[in-house]
Amino acid sequence: MPTTADIKQLHSLEVITDRMERLLQNSPADETEIVWLEARKAYARRQRSRIDTKTGPERTVLVRVLDRGRVGSFRTGTDEPGELASGIRSAIAQSRAREPLSGLPHLPGDESAPGATGPLHDPEIAEMSRGKAKAYLSELPLKQENAHLHWCEARVAVFNSRGVRRRTEVTSASLEIRTGRRPGAARATDAARTFALIDPKALLAEAREHHAGRDVLAPPTDSVPVVFSPIATIQLCDLLNTTSFSAKAYYDGTSFLREHMGIQVFDRRFNLCDDGTDPSGLAFPFDLEGSAKRSVDLISKGAPQTPTLDQRQAAVLGLPATAHAIGGNDARAENLFLLPGDESEPELFGAADGGLWVGWLEGIENLDPLRVRFRARARGVRAIGDGRLDRGVPDLVLEDSLLRAFSALLGIGNRPVRRASGDGYLGGISAPAVAVTGVQVRAT
């Protein structure tokens, strides 16, 4: 995680721009890149009549220099010009202890204009306070449910010596309704750049619909058909993303892409893309090298297409860059979409009759990166019988391979759900429910 420091308020983009320009102008390095990340994050939770709030502003400044063909870097949470200038000198000193880096003759440059993304900044979110958050949650007609609201306002800027000048301000908000703690508990969630795109009453109705009664069924002890809720599917797509599609995993050889690029290993209906320009997700216009985001197919008709790569990694590996730099020596998709299918929720239940519904996952472990074999605790589990949700089932342990589970699907839902990922403002994941033929399960 980047180094952070608490801040009282966000700087304007104009102030950030002025400081970055001065740092570039005075840098003694051959080339310099500065990434400025500044965010005000907050959280409010309503449990019946009680509402708790928490705020946590933070700042991270990333410096990368190229000097005599060698690369050095520095991270800090300060905004003081003198300390930032000292950080540049520290990065230069670090670079001189390293060998020249292949594949990076100069810092990245990208003159293409970012694509249209739709609204990125919502004044209502930017002006949200503890009092306003309490009022927002108080309006929800909760009974036994809890409501969790996260919101964030951020400034992001990427400048370098080769003329890259990217800057933007964004907001994001996410609302999750939770009901029940025993078997058959339920959650419903949504996230967006603006409050107007989140429907609290619809989320409340969904959580109540998926909440089971008090009767509980004994858990199965073998492989059974499973419908992963959109939340659980998002979590599995995130695991697939970080385990297999990151630049580091591909470079280290721990990703199955090394052996299966362009080969169909998933169901042909399984299509995973990354698109920072799509306003139906949590769009973001550029990566942390300043490259303009675009739509990139990661899995097309079940066949993996490419890892995520920044410009230097692409040069080293001899593959096209995908505009996914995240700072440091790695790249990762930040705006994932698992494309929806044609099946409604009742149709998925019919296809997986006799199986299970999994509401969400906890404690996800990566057991074998090459097979994407994972272990996780399944929560909010319900039996599926006669094509509908039946009684609740105690928590289960899932242990299986995503390569196997996603190779033959029973169906993909037609209603995607959005969830913020990572830091909460650079992007998110959108996915529908997915029905699979079988997953290995056992009691906890």
Image: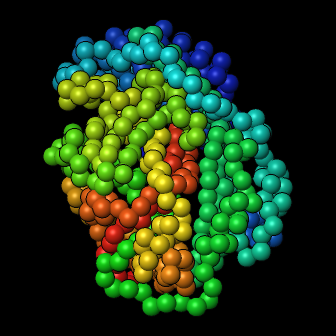
Most foreground residue, 214 or 180: 214
Image position of 380 (left or right of 268): right
**Where in the figure is residue 292, as x and y percent of width and height?**
46, 23
Q: Is residue 216 visible?
A: yes
Quadrant of image for the N terminus: top left
In the image, residue 54 above or below residue 210:
above
In the image, residue 310 above or below residue 198:
above
| Residue at x 53% of width, y 35% of height | 278
Q: Is residue 358 visible?
A: no
Which residue reaches farthest left? 259
| Residue at x 42% of width, y 65% of height | 435
| Residue at x 48% of width, y 40% of height | 335
In the image, residue 233 above or below residue 379:
above
Residue 210 position by quadrant: bottom right
In the image, residue 320 above or below residue 58:
above
Quadrant of image for the C terminus: bottom left
Most foreground residue, 382 or 2: 382
Image position of 193 (left or right of 306): right
Residue 370 position by quadrant: bottom left
